Structure formats: C-alpha cells, structure tokens
Amino acid sequence: MQRTCLLFALVLCFAGAGVSEDGFVQLFDGESLDGWVLLGQRGEGYTVKDGTIACAKGSGGNLLSASEYADFVLRFEFKLESGSNNGLCVRCPLGWSDMAYAGNELQIIDNSAERYANIKPWQKHGSLYHVAPAKTGALKPVGAWNSQEVRAEGSRITVILNGTKILDADTADVKDPALLAKHPGLKRRSGHIGFLGHNEPVQFRNIRIKRLP
C-alpha cells in the first residue's frame, strides 16, 4: 500500500510539472554556451558558472541566441548584485551594435543602487529602453533569485516579474517620428534574443522559451 501511494504521488508530481511548462524548450543546458553567439566580447564575456550563465564585473558583450524567434514567451531567472546592469535583447539582429535601437532592449538593472538613483523611469528594470517605463517594486532584494516572463506577440511586449505585470507596451502605439527614427527595432517582428552585458555582474538560469503560433 505504501509503495502504491508513493508511485501515485510521483505520477501527480510529474503531471503537474508538465502542465505549467507545456511547449517550452530549454535554451541553456547548464553546462555550456552551445546555441549562443557572443559578439563584441569585453573581458571574460559570459561564462558558465555553477549551472548559470554569468557576466562578471568588467565583462560584457552581446550574447545572442543562434536561433531567431518571432512571437514567443520567454521565462528565466536572474540574480543581481549591487549595481548590476544588463539587458534582455528581444527580436534583435545578429550583429554587434546598440541593440536598444537596432532591436529592442528590456532593462535588467539593480534599481536600488545609489549610482542609479537619478536614472529615467524608462531605465528602470523591465522597461523597454527609451520607449516605455516599467512599474517598480517587484524586484527582490539584491542577491535573491528573480523569476521573469517576457511575452512578445505581434507589436505587444509584456513583462511579468515575480508574478507581477510590470510592463505592457504596444510598440504600434509609438507615433513620434523622431523616436521611430531612432528606434528602427520597434518595427521588427522577429529576431534573436539574448543578454546585453554592460560591465556589471549578473547571473541567469532556467532559460526556456515557447514559440507562439
């Protein structure tokens, strides 16, 4: 009887795990950077550390997925240190350029750092850089793991941080000719995803993605 109950519990466990992640595939195997392309490396660039993708202080570059994605849901976890500053590239071209403009950059940054006390609202964590500010208050304290989901569907990009929706932006709503001229990436509907290192430390893990029809 005890063995039967144990088997039943295991079946329920595996069944439950499959429901929430249905259709997602891992982008990081926890051991290597296979499937990723590093451009414009600074310092060590990105390394694999304790099952995470790590960017050390003084390092950076554009770490982009080898594959392209159009509409998708991306889930990952990240951990910041004091003063961390990075970016999530969405629908970016495969090249070395400022992806905040050539593509789309969602901020990954320690909002609590004193050095960032006077940054613009659109520079806060989760914001679509220079275009749409995200809500604040959902980041966990420095040193804790955060869970984030990014959904890109058509012209709409949404960000959910630790269960709270902090960004819901429709790039089709951007009408300012000067802003559109500066951000050609806003019109992109497919491209690579990845991390944009800015010489500050950050770690990523459990990176998985689901293509949307």
Image (cartoon, helix red, strand yellow):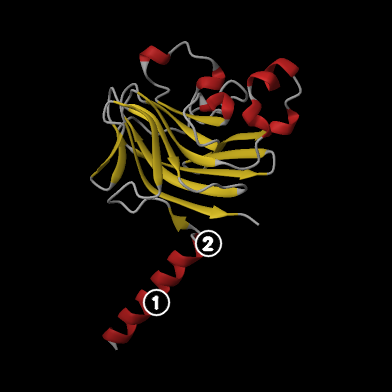
* Frontmost residue, 54 versus 12: 54
Q: Is residue 112 left or right of residue 159?
A: left
Q: Is residue 203 left or right of residue 207?
A: left
In the picture of the structure, the residue carrying the numbered disc 2 is 23
How dense is the environment of label 2, judged by Cα within 10 Å: few (below 14), some, or many (20 and up)? Answer: few
Q: Amino acid at mark 2?
A: Gly
- The residue shown at (65%, 26%) is 184
Where is residue 205? Give x, y as percent. Answer: 35, 46
Farthest top residue in view: 118
Identify the residue at image location x=62%, y=25%: 132
Name the residue rendered at 56%, 21% in the picture.
122
Where does residue 67 sit, x and y in percent of width and height?
50, 48
Chain-order first, disc 1 or disc 2:
1
Please name whichever residue, 87 or 93, is drawn nearer the observer in this view of the structure. Answer: 93
Where disc 1 sits, the SS reads helix
Where, by quadrant of the figure, is residue 200 drawn?
Answer: top left
Q: Position of residue 116 (x, y in %)?
A: 42, 15
* Amino acid identity at mark 1: Val
Q: Circle 2 — which element?
A: loop
Could you tell me which quadrant the C terminus lies in?
bottom right
Q: Name the residue rendered at 57%, 41% in the picture.
A: 191
Residue closest to the far front:
95
Locate the N terminus and report the quarter of the image it occupies: bottom left
Instruction: Looking at this view, name the residue that lies furthest to the left.
Output: 50
The mark lying in front, picked from 1 and 2, is 2
Q: Which residue is mark 1?
A: 11
Spot occupied by residue 207 in the image (x, y as percentages of width and height): 41, 48
Q: Residues within 10 Å of mark 1 (few under 14, many from 20)?
A: few
Tell me if 56 is positioned left or right of 100 in this view.
Answer: left
Measured Cα–Cα span from mark 1 to mark 2: 19 Å
